[in-house]
Amino acid sequence: MAHVFGFKDRQTVSAIETGVRRVSATELLQAAEKFQVPLDYFTDPFRVAGEIRFSWRQSGVGPSELATYERTAGSWVGAYRTLSAQIGKRSPLMRRALGLTKAAKLNDAVDAGERFTSEFELGKVPAHRLAGVMQEQLGILVLMVDAYQGISGAACRLPELDAVLIARREVAGRRNFDLAHEFFHILTWEAMPPAHVEEPVDSGGNRIEQLANSFASALLMPKEVVESLADWRRLEGDNLIAHLNATADELSVTSSALRWRLVTLGHLTNAIARALPEALLRNNGRKQSEETLPLLFSRSYAEVVATAIKRGYLSVRRAARLVGMTIEGLDELFTAHGLKYALAL
């Protein structure tokens, strides 16, 4: 480094690293040229290139499109990491992990999902509390985003931060399953790193995806709850479809995911499950989804950005660019998340 900058001694480099000496504009340009990196490699505190890893749940998105969206998503997560530290919001000291490997049986993943629901007291509808537990008790950032068509979600890992991105325009049941699925990847990242890209399917896939699906199904649809809602073995035809759709709505999952959970529990045969008409299960039996979309990002994310603005670590204009909004749109986002004071200060 001393040679690159033309310094006479290494102590000058040490002074720069410890903040005693500043780098001049000329030296910064020189470093960018020598190392063949863009200037923002040194100047953008939100940059995460080289540190961040993603596992995307997507179908039909081209490599260049995905790379572009990954840079955008990386800036959101990178900003949260930097701004959280600046306002004194510390990352968890330790990460939670599941003691599972690729050699685990599917039943092991099912047991882990059931235990998580029980130990963290997610209640009879675990989908309603999962995101809150992930953020508040485990320190995992959960973001609801407007993703490219074909992207349903992603797990993301930085050295000191885990995050899950979920496409908020998916139906609620799909969002919840994707969240639980990506949560599994966060909890098992070191033991079985997920692929950079995976197809969003409720069953099948490679071994890691099978384990993730089994975990997600059991977490969102605990055996005791599912079995208390109907005598599934006695149902057939239209009655079975009606109960599937109604129960899926009650648990905030998709009818398709519930169908395969019932197969796992032995309440439906594979043949019966495959024979059910997909058209009658789509949107849990409704012609179209009528739900209200969840708010963009999350309250914790909006709160960190708003607090950073308030304390002078981030300008309003740069914050608006970060989230791809106008200043007015940013103000509306804060208000929607109950942070009405943000831009006024």
Image: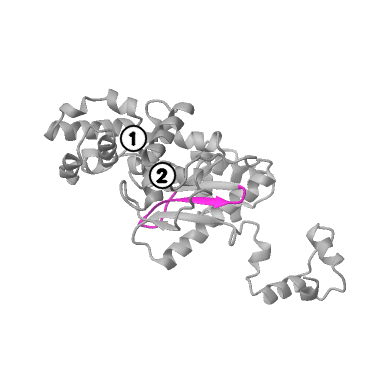
Q: State which quarter of the image contains the C terminus.
A: top right
Counting from the top left corner in percent of width and height, residue 84 is at: 64, 45
Query: On the rendered structure, is 227 left or right of 11?
Result: left
Report the residue that reaches farthest toward the top. 228
Query: Could you tell me the amino acid type at mark 2?
Result: His
Picture layout, residue 233 above or below residue 163: above
Query: On the rendered structure, is 267 left or right of 327?
Result: left
> In this figure, which residue is indicated by the disc labeled 1?
252
Query: Could you tell me the amino acid type at mark 1?
Result: Ser
Picture layout, residue 299 above or below residue 316: above
Q: Nearer the viewer, residue 344 or 65?
A: 65
Report the residue that reaches farthest toward the left. 237
Task: Give the number of callouts.
Answer: 2
**Residue 231 part of the magenta-drawn span:** no
Instruction: Give the class, few, some or many, for how many residues have Cα within 10 Å of label 2's Cα (few <14, many ≥20).
Output: many
Picture layout, residue 162 above or below residue 221: below
Residue 281 bears which disc, if any?
Answer: none
> In this figure, which residue is indicated by the disc labeled 2?
181
Nearer the viewer's eye, disc 1 or disc 2? 2
Q: What residue do we see at 37% from left, 41% from top? A: 106
Counting from the top left corner in percent of width and height, residue 101 is at: 47, 46
SS at circle 2: helix
Q: Which residues are magenta?
A: 144-160
Query: On the rendered structure, is 321 left or right of 11?
Result: left
Mark 1 and mark 2: Cα distance apart in space: 15 Å
Q: State which quarter of the image contains the N terminus.
A: bottom right
Q: Nearer the viewer, residue 304 or 280?
A: 280
